[in-house]
Amino acid sequence: LVGASDHTTTKALYAKDPDGLEFEVSWLVPLDKVTDQMRASAGTSPLDIDAEIARWGADSVGAI
C-alpha cells in the first residue's frame, strides 16, 4: 500500500504490483447517499478507513 485518499464521494487505496506498477482500488459512495454538501466540499484528504467503515458499513455496496 502506497497511499489512501478520501476524495469525499470516492475512497481510494493505492498500491504497487510486483512489477512496480501503481494501481488504484476505489469505492464510490452510493449515489443516493451523496449530498449537495458532499458535492460542494469535494476535495482530497487522508483516508481514515476505520471511520469510513463505521460510517458506511463493511458490506455496503458502492455506486456504479
Image: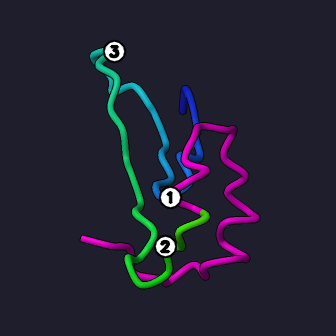
Quarter-of-image position of residue 51? bottom right
Quarter-of-image position of residue 16? top left
For the C terminus, the image quarter is bottom left
The residue segment tinted magenta is: 38-64
Which of pointers 1 and 3 lies earlier in the amino acid sequence? 3
Badge 1 vs badge 2, beta-carbon distance below 8 Å: yes
The x and y percentages for residue 61 are: 39, 81
Q: Amino acid at mark 1?
A: Arg
Query: 39 or 2, which is in the foreground?
Result: 39
Would residue 31 be counted in the magenta stretch? no
The x and y percentages for residue 5 are: 58, 40
Which of pointers 1 and 2 lies earlier in the amino acid sequence? 2
| Secondary element at tag 2 | loop
- Please give the residue where the numbered disc 2 appears in the rendered image: 34
User: Residue, x 45% and y 69% (percent of image)?
Assistant: 29
Q: Is residue 51 above or below residue 26?
A: below
Q: Amino acid at mark 2?
A: Val
| Secondary element at tag 3 | loop
Q: Amino acid at mark 3?
A: Gly
User: Residue, x 60% and y 79% (percent of image)?
Assistant: 56
Compute the Cα span from label 1 to label 3: 34 Å
Query: 15 or 18, which is in the foreground?
Result: 15
Left or right, residue 27 beside residue 1: left
Quarter-of-image position of residue 45? top right
Q: Is residue 44 above or below residue 51?
A: above
Res 39 label: 1
Category of crowding for the residue at label 3, using alpha-carbon neighbours closer than 10 angstroms: few (below 14), some (14–19), many (at least 20): few
- Please give the residue where the numbered disc 3 appears in the rendered image: 20
Left or right, residue 44 beside residue 32: right
Query: 17 or 23, which is in the foreground?
Result: 23
